[in-house]
Image (tube, helix red, strand yellow):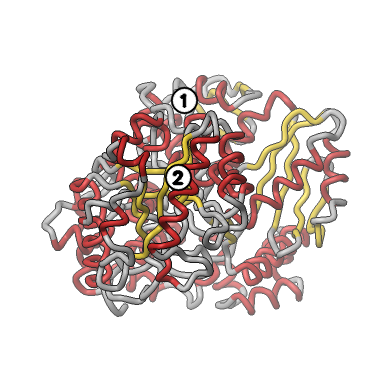
Amino acid sequence: MGGVMKNADMAGIFEQMADFLEIRGENPFKIRAYRRAAQVIEHLPREVATMLAEGEDLKALPGIGEAIASKMAELVRTGHLVAWETLRDSLPEGLSTLLEIPGIGPKTAYRLATELGISSVDELEQAILEGKVAHLFRLGDRTAQNILHSIRSMRRKDQRIPLGQALPIVEEILSALRPLPGVRNLVPAGSLRRFRETLGDIDLMGTADNPEAVIRSFVSLPQVREVLAQGPTKASVILSGGLQADLRMVEHEAFGSLLQYFTGSRQHNIALRTRMQKKGLKLSEYGITDTATDRLEKFSTEEAFYERLGLQYIPPEIREDRGEIDLAERKAIPRLVERSDIRGDLHVHTNWSDGTASLEDMARAAKALGYQYLAITDHSGGLGIAGGLNEERLLKQMQAIRQLDERLEGIRLLAGIEVNILADGRLDLPDGILSRLDVVVASVHSALNQSEAKMTRRILKALENPHVDILAHPTCRLIGQREPIAVDLEAVFQAAAQHRKILEINSMPDRLDLQDISIYRARELGVLLAIDTDAHRPEHFDLVRFGIAMARRGWCRPAHILNCRPLGEVLSYLKRDEAYRRTG
């Protein structure tokens, strides 16, 4: 492997190690250790290579023992892992490829490779079409067809679809099905319920007095392009756009355990099952079985399910096996930020630049949401964005904002700007005018291909500017369209903490920037965050739910979010003189 070993690649190698060891029938504890290591590495806020370079002890990480720490160091040092390569080479060719297909586990992949000689996705597809897979494994045509659909769905969507694309489709489906007679519960599960930024498919869970009628309505929806399977309580379909959706209906009293099981994450559920096995309890989608008596208990709610295990309820967004179970056992999970905590928005655009609505329209929409304050932060003029504000137009807008603020009751308007951080770290407006604003949001929009060292210096220089308040969408990524910029986020977080700057959690569904693991790390370092919508029209204010979800995944409480604070505290934090700000 060329270049510095990245955490994502390292995690993939350890996950494959676990699969390979499972195929070989190795010790289950060893297999779990590698899976746990893969999960820990995937969610580290810093690169392992950086940690080693700074002399950190990898064994201090949860679930990382001496043997795995040594292998992590070997991967960073050499780009290779002899144990993994030896194991891989001892197994049939193409096994790794088969393991990437949803629905195919290690042992099935091994049988496909050894008994049918399959080493590629194309060969597997052909074998299914010829009936060999259904015959060999006695799976039946339906299961074989499901694998076939997984293959084709995987190709169509390149494995994962952005959350922002999937959620509106799911909400249309739920809106159509929830009013049906007898429906009591109907919610998404899986990655969507945990608000993962991308997802592979949709799991819907529900209960109804007549589940078969709900299933019939589901497969008949206009969003359904193809029906893969249909039974009295379950159906699988392909939606417009290639997304697979499964609907499962159960009896009312079993809904809680079903929802918990299919919400996941896989790592969370494995950790939960392992812990409860020691207490003589077996967990499943059907409920909790006492192994001593073989008695099954059913649960209509997740709250009751977790309570039976002696645990505090665990919010779906943090079910990722990152210490939440230990905290739940101690009843120590904090109250995470909620929509009702948000008191304003500090990054909003109008038709003075590239927004579509007027100052007053945006202000009244924010007031209707119950917000106490709203910062107008149109683009500066150096970006080539239509209507970007130069000094003269910014001064005029400031005056317009002050005048509107005097007229409006029940909401405070703040005059701001989203100023571009130039390639050398300077801002494209002078300090003199920035000092007269309530809020200065700085962001990178150009020269995105700079080296990590240059980009880091560029952003750090902007953070040193005393007039900058917020760093917007810090990694500049567009999910599924543009990779994040190369930047040392640890250095950025350290600088933000040092200079008391605010880092944005951008709620735009194609950004979700910062992402959850970065939010977690920034919060650990004491950096204050802001959940902003980057709204360009009134309807965009509703996108705040995406930013809130990312903040929750980063374990944020209201205290970690600036715009959960009342106006007075926000103004105090921004360190602006009230009388000067009012005269503009």
Mark yes or no: residue 319 visible: no
Q: Residue at x 21, y 74 (%)?
A: 78
Residue kind at label 2, given as amino acid type: Ala
Q: Position of residue 169 (x, y in %)?
A: 71, 52
Q: On residue 280, which mark appears?
A: 1
Q: Residue at x 73, y 26 (%)?
A: 252
Q: Which residue is mark 2?
A: 375
Label 2 to label 1: alpha-carbon separation: 55 Å
Local secondary structure at mark 2: strand
160, above or below 185, in the image? below
Residue sitting nearer the eye, 41 or 381: 381
Residue sitting nearer the eye, 52 or 341: 341
Q: Earlier in the sequence, mark 2 or mark 1?
A: 1
Q: Residue at x 37, y 53 (%)?
A: 441
Find out whether the residues at labels 2 and 1 contact each other: C-beta distance under 8 Å.
no
332, above or below 174, in the image? above
Local secondary structure at mark 1: loop
Q: Position of residue 104 (x, y in %)?
A: 58, 61
Q: Residues within 10 Å of mark 1 (few under 14, many from 20)?
A: few
Q: Residue at x 55, y 54 (%)?
A: 350
Residue sitting nearer the eye, 387 or 552: 387
Determine whether, in the image, residue 183 is placed left or right of residue 558.
right
Mark yes or no: residue 262 visible: yes
Quarter of the figure with the N terminus = bottom left
